[in-house]
Amino acid sequence: MRHCQIFGPLVSICNSSVSAASTNVQNRWLNIAECELSTLARQCLNRRIPDHGKLEEQTRAWETHRNQGGTAVKWRFSTEDARMKLTHLYPQIS
């Protein structure tokens, strides 16, 4: 079975409820989106959901609760720490 058949309804829900605004240079919004989707999967989608309507209901309830909580991202290390650990990924500027 192809991924689009399995994840099609979830992707359509995510596409309808996520709107992209301007992004900063570091693309941190993508990291935040990945974290939120991971949390959604662990907290809401970790069980069998019988139909599309129930899936929408559950994800909207989760989204409302999550937004009211005002959860912030806690970055694990600073940009400088990342540059030291991931030096092979950063270009050398002279």
Image (tube, helix red, strand yellow):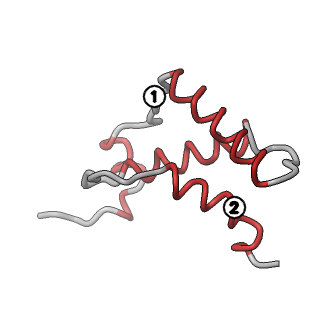
Q: Mark 1 or 2, which is nearer the eye?
A: 2
Q: Amino acid at mark 1?
A: Ala
Judge whether 72 appears above or below 34 on screen.
above
Judge whether 14 appears above or below 79 on screen.
below
Residue lying at 69% horizontally and 46% vertically, measured from the top left: 56
Residue pointed to by mark 1: 72
Report x, y in % for residue 7: 71, 64
- Taking 59 as reference, is 18 left or right? left
Real-space CA distance between mark 1 and mark 2, rounded to the nearest whole angstrom: 27 Å
Report x, y in % for residue 34: 54, 50
Give the total number of marks visible in the rendering. 2
- Taking 4 as reference, is 30 left or right? left
Q: Residue furthest top?
A: 69
In front of the other: 75 or 17: 17
Report x, y in % for residue 26: 30, 53
Q: Quadrant of the N terminus?
A: bottom right
